[in-house]
Image (spheres, rainbow, N blue to C red):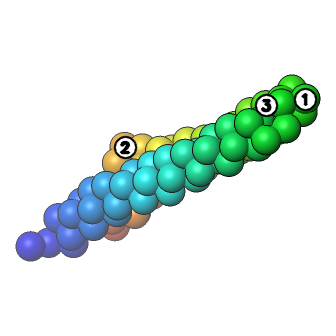
Amino acid sequence: MDNLGWIAIISIATAGLTIAIGSLGPALGQGRAVAQALSSIAQQPDEAGTITRTLFVGLAMIESTAIYCFVIAIILLFVNPFWNYATALIGG
């Protein structure tokens, strides 16, 4: 197998691994954050507004991690700099 084939295989495997880990971690984090927020609201119903506002900010930050992983996977699949470098070397 030539170098372009190896670059393609490694890029696809890395993109898949990035999406798998990048979606599993934030999903577990969001589940834990929501469970803890609901527990806190149940214990202190007067602070529900503050807890909810803080929860949404935290969920947005956790979600951004998954979006970053998605962007990296898309870059590896469609705009791979290693692929462009290897094709430039072969092409001249």
Q: Residue at x 61, y 44 (%)?
A: 35
Q: Secondary structure at mark 3?
A: helix
Asked if the residue at tag 2 contacts the one at tag 3, i.e. Cβ–Cβ closer than 8 Å, the answer is: no
Q: Residue at x 79, y 31 (%)?
A: 52
- Which quarter of the rendering shows the C terminus? bottom left
Q: Residue at x 36, y 55 (%)?
A: 20
x and y, in percent, of residue 4 in the image = 22, 64
First reached walking from the N terminus: tag 1 or tag 3: 1
Label 1 to label 3, Cα distance in Å? 11 Å
- Which quarter of the rendering shows the N terminus? bottom left
The amino acid at mark 2 is Phe
Vertical comparison of 60 with 46: above or below: below
Residue bearing mark 3 = 52
In which quarter of the view is residue 17 placed?
bottom left
Q: Is residue 74 left or right of residue 55?
A: left
x and y, in percent, of residue 72 in the image = 49, 51
The amino acid at mark 1 is Asp
Residue bearing mark 1 = 46
Q: Foreground mark, 1 or 3?
A: 1
Mark 2 crowd level (few <14, some 14–19, many ≥20, 10 Å Cα): few
The amino acid at mark 3 is Thr
Residue bearing mark 2 = 78
In which quarter of the view is residue 83 placed?
bottom left
Vertical comparison of 71 with 91: above or below: above
Vertical comparison of 51 with 91: above or below: above
Asked whether residue 27 appears in the rendered view, the answer is yes
